[in-house]
Image (cartoon, grey):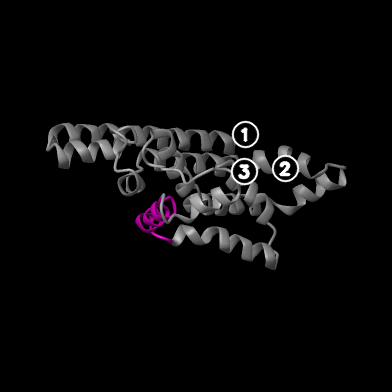
Amino acid sequence: MGLGFALALLTAPNRPLRQVTRAIIFLPVVIGLGTSSLLWFWLFDQQVGQFNQIMVDLGIFKEPAVWFTKADMALTAVIISVTWKVIGFGMLLFVAGIQSIQGEVSEAALIDGANYWQRVWHIILPLSMRTILLTTLISVIGSMLAFEQFYIMTGGNPRGQTFTSVYWIYQNSFISFKLGYGAALSIILTLIVLVFSSLQVVLSNRSHKS
């Protein structure tokens, strides 16, 4: 989310080069999650993966790493792939929030002698709070509902250490055939999402009134 906000600050002005940059960063969002997960699974492959080769060429790794045998390495691989996939969506939301701020506000601060970072901290950030709350909610719910990337890239391995909530529901419902248990977990997850959504609405209304 922080990286998306930083990219939004860089690309918010409607200038040709920055519009092209926005389009390039947003491009991975239109790729299906299953397709991008399979693509990154190949990129992390020990034998033919280009990501490993780049890390070796840069001197970060001495030899190609095996990403999916340890939980921390597997989670790092998934985080890299998901960040590449969804950062453009967060950036676009932040760009919309920044562009909705009236130009007169920033111009008045500029006349009063505020530098760029003072305008970001005291104007852009507070007035983008509703967008930040919305983006945070989407990120949290997306993390709780993560399934495809773990199913394709890790399969829950090693030893189930990369199971997510949805993957655990899938495992119990369709592999172990504990349908009642899986249904109960689904209801609990739905209630958690509902609580987060209600919290976001309340906080957004408070920020709007303030």
Whichever of labels 1 and 2 marks the residue nearer the N terminus, that label is 2
Q: Disc 3 designates what residue?
A: 128
**Between 19 and 31, which is closer to the camera in this rendering?**
31
Label 1 and label 2: CA atoms lie apart by 18 Å
Res 188 quadrant in image: top left
**Residue at the outermost front position:** 62
Q: Amino acid at mark 1?
A: Ser
**Between 99 and 33, which is closer to the camera in this rendering?**
33
Q: Quick one: label 2, few (<14), some, or many (20+) residues within 10 Å? A: some
Q: Quick check: marks 3 and 1 in contact, CB under 8 Å?
A: no
Q: Image point 51% across, 33% down: which residue?
A: 203
Q: Image point 47% across, 46% down: which residue?
A: 64
Front of the two marks 2 and 3: 2
Q: Amino acid at mark 2?
A: Val
Q: Disc 2 designates what residue?
A: 120
Magenta part of the chain = 31-45
Q: Amino acid at mark 3?
A: Ser
- The answer to whether 161 is drawn above or below residue 92 in the figure is above
**Between 41 and 30, which is closer to the camera in this rendering?**
41
Q: Disc 1 designates what residue?
A: 210
**Residue 157 percent coordinates (x, y):** 31, 38
Front of the two marks 1 and 2: 2
Q: Quick one: label 1, few (<14), some, or many (20+) residues within 10 Å? A: few
Label 3 and label 1: CA atoms lie apart by 13 Å
